[in-house]
Amino acid sequence: MKRSKLFTSDLIRSTLSLCLFLICLGAIAQKGSKVATSNNQTINIHHANSLEFDKKLGEGAQRLIGNVELENAGILLNCDSAYMFPDNSCHAFGHVHMSKKDSMDLYGDSIYYHGDTRKAEMFGQIRYLRKSLTLTTQHMMYVADSSRVNFWNGGTVTDSATVLVSKRGTYFMKKKICAFKDSVVLTNPSYIIHCDTMAYEPDNQTAHFSGPTFIKGKSTNMYCIAGYYNSHTGVSDFWHHAVITSKKGEKLSGDSIYYDKKKDYGEVTNNVALIDSTDNITIKGEYALYKGEQRTIMVTRHALMDQAYEKDTLHLHGDTLYGYNISMSDSNKNTRTPKLLLAYHHVKFFKKDMQGKCDSLTYDEKDSVMRMFYNPIVWSDQNQLTADTMRLFMANKKLDLLDMRHNSFIISRDTLASKEDSLQFNQIKGRNMKGTFRNNKLYKVKVLGNAQTIYYVYSDNNKSVIGANRADCSNMQIYIDSNRIKSITFLQKPDATLFPLKDVKPAEFLLGNFVWRIGERPMRKEDIFKN
């Protein structure tokens, strides 16, 4: 009888214990439970198919299996199974999905999460989703309080039009900025960016970069040390040794380049250089304004154009230089329009065999003609050439013809003049002149209208002066050799007189409006910047 009562009591106690456990488990599965913690960041158990205590993991550790759903301060965590620990942390496995309303979805193979610090470390095939943005990696840290995710072993960010790859990165969820470091590559249908460091704003498609940066586009390539580019608006700003190179051969560089791709408009400041490798032309200055729609570039502040020839370079300076038919885009890519250069105010140029100055100048690549206006002057060898306007024709990148219009005058100091300040000059004057060059030296001059000349005549051995010849004629043709008048052909009846040396007073043998302007002649490249 006693044994029966004892058995009954044990059975009742066992039955009650089982019922209490099932009730507890049911409560966990249906209504949720809590892991004890000292603050209000407790990880709550919303659902699990089963719960076990696992002493192998530590005192109080629990194992949740099947359709596990946990919650911590608005963050939901779903997985196949999880370990819960008394320190308010968990380790979740299998089809892990962490989410926060209207903020993010994070998927991975496993995750370690601590409720007090609200930090999560995720492993495996990880995907972070936010609206149209996707971040994939294999090792990630999520920090809820600072709303950021970090990765270290390589990651890829994809939005509607961009793929961004780097070794390390951080996404700031509130600021909606991706910060990337080390071997960053951004790929867009219109361009590819390679750089060391980048901050990318997905919502407005803007990339801020630093470190050596290379941008490869369809028609242009770009380089800089820092800057930004907005692929939606097409606006960019590049700093520190910035360079834009077109596939047609132009290269635009400066300390800073602002460029609007849609408008094909740009501004360049400090150390500006536009290089046209096709025509060996470089335009430099401290400020440039580029307008692709008008196909123009304006350069000012110490503006300089250099054009390289086979054995020499033409250096030209003006207050402002304009280049026409200049394009950094791929418009008219199958045709090539000849370029036009305009220079105005205080123009000077230097070439070893020719120098000059004027107020304004144009150079048209179409006919290789340089046009000079307002008090122009050209020095060729020992000859000083002046007129109201001049046209200098080039052929095969060499001086070919000089067309002088109105008040034309050619002066050269006589080679046997005894003193540097001597007034002994050979002179040719007329209404219009055409000078012809051979090997970049003036060898023939045709004077058209009101022709006058004074030149000094030498003995047969060319070592002594015997007199000065003065001639007037409507038209004449003069041949020059070694800076001396070799012969003159009078095309109409001339009035010519040879004066013996004893009757020659050089100061009286100067034609009207004679001005010797040797002090204005640029003797080297640097002189073209002198007033």
Image: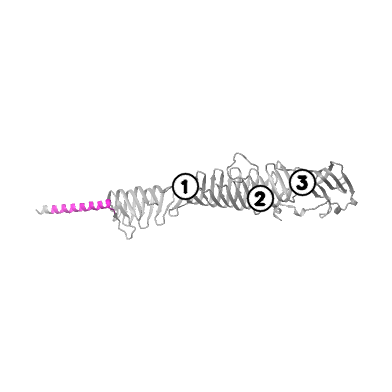
Spot occupied by residue 415 in the image (x, y as percentages of width and height): 82, 49
Q: Are marks 3 and 1 in contact (CB under 8 Å)?
A: no
Mark yes or no: residue 134 visible.
no
Q: Which of marks 3 and 1 is in front?
A: 3
Spot occupied by residue 246 in the image (x, y as percentages of width and height): 58, 44
> Which of marks 1 and 3 precedes in the sequence?
1
Residues in magenta, as a range = 6-32
Amino acid at circle 2: Leu
Asked if residue 15 lies in the magenta stretch, the reply is yes
> Which of marks 2 and 3 precedes in the sequence?
2
Label 2: state its secondary structure.
Answer: strand
Label 3: state its secondary structure.
Answer: strand
**Quadrant of the drawing holding the C terminus:** bottom right
Residue farthest along the left direction in this orientation: 1
Tell me which residue sits at (16%, 52%) in the image.
11
**Residue that carries the numbered disc 1 in the rendered image:** 165
**Residue that carries the numbered disc 2 in the rendered image:** 321
Q: Residues within 10 Å of mark 1 (few under 14, many from 20)?
A: many
Q: Marks 3 and 2, Cα distance to the nearest angstrom? A: 24 Å
Q: How crowded is mark 3: few (under 14 residues within 10 Å), some or many (20 or more)?
A: some
Q: Marks 1 and 2, Cα distance to the nearest angstrom? A: 43 Å
Please tell me whether the stretch drawn in magenta is mainly helix, strand or loop: helix
